[in-house]
């Protein structure tokens, strides 16, 4: 008998104080339980139980041993369960990192739909607009809207292009601009994961111009930048989903429509698996299929 099973038998016997009940619950014979306990006592060199015709009780050594091994045995059981579930397509845990806006608006109905199909799946969701270390932070999957990744160790899967546009308040001087050369670095509200400056590369299909953005203001959240632009603080360069409602309500207008920045990509990325675990592959496929229906404001 392996050590793990012997320890499980011992802990159950310590709880039930009845070898016959332990035998029934573990589908063993009472003699098998007795032999397992005896072998463990022989290995440890101490008596773990006091046995009488009426009851079984722990010795002092047995009580100390049970208290010390209980956390370790539970941790091992949890680890065994997680590893087994990791190879099931319809059961287990998924830890997902997602951008704030997408996590609040698009992800919830997708998760609800997935759990209707796979009720044994459970999720831990973390919302963050910056890139995460998917390995060190123990994520199974991250969803990001970004430019091409520099990380060569994780697995990246492009889902769809995400166009960006320049926007400003309709009554501001920025709404009348004809050329990006009219912009100064102080006019440009930068998006940065570290709240720093960024370079905007704008093209009209024939020529391009680069502008330093964020000298006066930068933020790591697109909703903040949209609100700042709507208040007349400057021009923001944001994906359509961040500013769709602002444009519909008239708080923002598309400026310099003939000039466009490079597209971003909505991307799934994973730890460096040789083969995606079934539960991650199943969710990824479902997410991609459902995205179009739940993200109509993306374009």
Image (cartoon, rainbow, N blue to C red):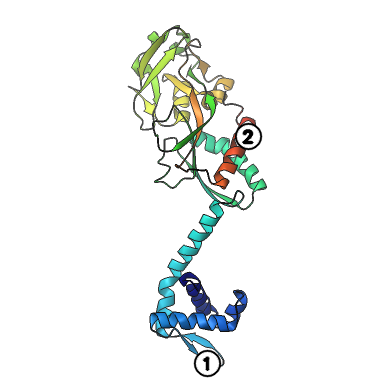
**Quadrant of res 191:** top left
Q: Considering depth in this image, is 248 or 164 the residue closer to the camera? A: 164
For the point 49% across and 77% down, the residue is: 10
**Quadrant of res 112:** top right
Q: Position of residue 243 (x, y in %)?
A: 52, 24
- Residue occupied by mark 1: 52
Q: Is residue 299 above or below residue 31?
A: above
Q: Considering depth in this image, is 230 or 205 the residue closer to the camera? A: 205
Q: Quadrant of the image for the C terminus?
A: top right
Secondary structure found at label 1:
loop
Q: Position of residue 288 (x, y in %)?
A: 59, 34
For the point 44% across and 26% down, the residue is: 225
Total label count? 2
Q: Is residue 166 above or below residue 1?
A: above
- Rounded to the nearest angstrom, the CA distance separating label 1 from label 2 is 64 Å
The crowd level at tag 2 (other Cα within 10 Å; few <14, some 14-19, many 20+) is few
Q: Position of residue 189 (x, y in %)?
A: 40, 22
Q: Residue 289 — which label?
A: 2
């Amino acid at each position: 008998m392996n050590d793990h099973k012997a320890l499980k038998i011992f802990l159950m016997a310590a709880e039930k104080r009845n070898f016959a009940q332990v035998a029934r619950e573990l589908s063993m014979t009472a003699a098998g339980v007795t032999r397992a306990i005896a072998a463990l006592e022989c290995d440890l060199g101490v008596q773990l139980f006091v046995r009488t015709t009426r009851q079984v009780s722990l010795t002092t050594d047995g009580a100390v041993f049970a208290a010390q091994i209980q956390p370790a045995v539970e941790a091992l059981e949890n680890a065994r369960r997680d590893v087994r579930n990791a190879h099931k397509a319809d059961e287990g845990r998924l830890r997902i990192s997602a951008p704030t806006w997408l996590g609040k608006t698009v992800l919830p109905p997708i998760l609800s739909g997935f759990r209707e199909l796979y009720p044994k799946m459970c999720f831990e969701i973390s919302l963050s607009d910056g890139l995460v270390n998917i390995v060190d932070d123990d994520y199974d999957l991250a969803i990001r809207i970004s430019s091409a990744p520099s990380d060569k160790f994780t697995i990246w899967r492009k889902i769809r292009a995400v166009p960006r546009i320049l926007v400003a308040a309709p009554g501001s001087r920025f709404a009348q601009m004809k050329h990006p050369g009219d912009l100064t670095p102080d006019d440009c509200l930068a998006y940065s994961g570290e709240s720093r400056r960024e370079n905007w590369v704008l093209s009209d299909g024939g020529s391009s111009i680069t502008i330093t953005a964020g000298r006066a203001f930068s933020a790591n959240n697109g909703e903040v930048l949209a609100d700042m632009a709507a208040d007349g603080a400057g021009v923001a360069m944001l994906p359509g989903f961040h500013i769709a409602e602002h444009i519909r309500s008239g708080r923002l207008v598309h400026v310099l429509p003939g000039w466009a920045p490079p597209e971003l990509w909505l991307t799934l990325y994973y730890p460096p698996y040789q083969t995606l675990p079934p539960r991650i592959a199943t969710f990824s496929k479902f997410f991609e299929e459902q995205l179009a229906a739940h993200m109509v404001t993306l374009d």
